[in-house]
Amino acid sequence: MAGMTVAPRRWLARLAATAGLLVTVVALLIAPATPASAHAVLQSSSPAASSVVPSGPAEVVLTFSESVRKVPGKIRVIAPDGSRADRGEPSFDDAAVTIPVDPAGERGTYLVSFRVISADSHPVSGAFTYSVGAPSTPPVDSGDDSRANPVVGNAVKVARFLGYAGLVLLVGPALVLAALWPRRLPRRGPARLAWTGLGVVAVATLADLWLQVPYTAGGGIFEVTGEGFGSVFGSAFGAAHLVRLGLLAAAAFLLRPLLTRPSGRTDAIILAVLGGAALLTWPLAGHPAASPAPAVSVVVDAVHLGSMAVWLGGLLMLAGFLLRQADERELGAILPIWSRWAALAVSALLLAGTVQALIEVATFDALVNTTYGRLLLAKIGLFALVIAVAAYSRQLVRRRTAAQRPVPVRRAVLVELVVTVVVLGLSATLVQTTPARTAVAESSGTQAGLFSTTLSSPLFSLQVELDPAERGNNSMHLYAYGKDDNQPLPVVEWRATAALPSAGIEPIEVPLLPLTDNHAYGDVSLPAAGDWQLKITARTSDIDQATVTATVPIR
């Protein structure tokens, strides 16, 4: 009997390893060697940013790295006198956005501001200038603020976390009650947990739909409109969430008999199919649907999410019910089965996470030099800790001491639960973070000549951008943020100078124009190459001001 038991296990292990290698190879073959398309990036424009054209164009064309959708009223062209130069609604053709403008407009500098929705449902905003005839003082966009609202951004992360947590609360009890629950034990506690999970997932899904309106438009949490809801419902994001709500409603009818008594195999199979379909709605509404290999990414992300729910949900049932209520004989039968399930779930998590990381990160530079990559490293470190604790629990089960002494197992399970809750929080943040490959492409691809740095003072942090960082005309953008909270910091007055001491060039005054309360823009002509010294002073109140300096290499 022992030989017959070991052989199938070895066969299953070999099969799982072979399948893992095949999936990884297929993912690498399917994924093209181009930057990931999640989070659109403005690749080019016509007229080009900071360019000077001899006559007014009849249209402004924006070309992004992926297809984008419209955010009503968030694409504007501002004439030198501050009036609207755009005429009519912009047209969207895959990755190209065409804005009709008045070709008979006055000479001077025009400001183009935009906010669109990328294929992964995340908003992308920006602005640039071009000049007709000769540059002038850039105009100010006095329209509705298109910046992301920090309250909305944080609320979106909370809603995503609640969705993951609700999935764990739902899957764990349903799975254990269907396959591992002793008949003599009451089902009321696990049933309440499952219904709570179902409700949390439904509420989180509705919150996602609500928050997507101000998240895309840039307003406050209650700034929603019928047009905004129509845009969300008509998108892939809205469709995925509506399908999820429908699947939850259908699953509720099958859950009731399962949670009250042992159910038939047919109901369990149908419920598993509904659950698998519901799992697909998460990646279909996020980064995986817009990756270089969307089919692979969607399936892999669904496997990753499902494995997490099985593992963490099972741990929750062990810690909360089985290790407390089951006797030694029942635990002796349950724990070995659960140990095998947990091993399979962890293997699926590792495999799916590896494939997804290859697609979304791809390079070591993207892993260590982007926010997405660093969050992923933190998640991997915590996951390694959980694996170590799980291995300890598995050893107790293999030695057959867990049933006699469940307290050490219960403590290990509680540690796993605490750490994996933190991992869930990181996952919710990763969903809202620009993928590493896109971040690298955005910083080094289309903006190869851009100088960018962040300077610190006791009052603020200042992001400085100089484009194209070459001899001749350059455009300067300054962004002020709070020292402690990293939120946009209003600046009352800006001053800046540029000097090249090695060539005997005295400080040149840089005229700056506030575009928003924390963002200023200026044009400066740098006549020679070398290491220029920028000195920037920002006054934040009648008495508070600080000066920062930066050395900028000019080619």
Image (tube, rainbow, N blue to C red):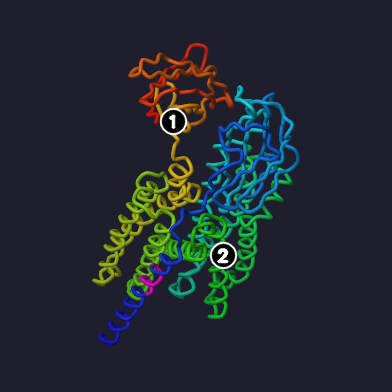
342 displayed left or right of 196:
left
The kind of secondary structure element at disc 1 is: loop
Counting residues from the N terminus, which is met first, the one under dot 1 or under dot 2?
2
User: Mark 2 belongs to which amino acid?
Assistant: Ala
Q: CA distance from mark 1 to mark 2?
A: 52 Å
The kind of secondary structure element at disc 2 is: helix
The span shown in magenta is 19-24
Q: Which mark is residue 470?
A: 1
Q: Quadrant of the N terminus?
A: bottom left
Question: 84 or 424: which is nearer to us?
Answer: 84
173 displayed left or right of 387:
right
* Residue 32 vertical placement versus 376 (above, below): below
Q: Which residue sits at x=47%, y=49%?
A: 438
Q: Nearer the viewer, mark 1 or mark 2?
A: 1
Query: Label 2 neighbourhood size at 10 Å, few (<14), some (14-19), many (20+)?
Result: many
Magenta stretch, main secondary structure class = helix
Residue 525 x, y percent position in the rendering: 49, 23
Residue at which label 2 appears: 278
* Residue 421 vertical placement versus 263 (above, below): above
Asked which quadrant contains residue 247, the reply is: bottom right
Residue 234 x, y percent position in the rendering: 69, 55
Residue 112 x, y percent position in the rendering: 63, 35
| The stretch drawn in magenta includes residue 21 | yes
Q: Quadrant of the C terminus?
A: top left
Q: Which residue sits at x=71%, y=41%?
A: 100
Q: Can you see residue 280? A: yes
Query: Label 1 neighbourhood size at 10 Å, few (<14), some (14-19), many (20+)?
Result: many
Q: Which residue sits at x=74%, y=31%?
A: 104
Question: 260 or 348: which is nearer to us?
Answer: 348
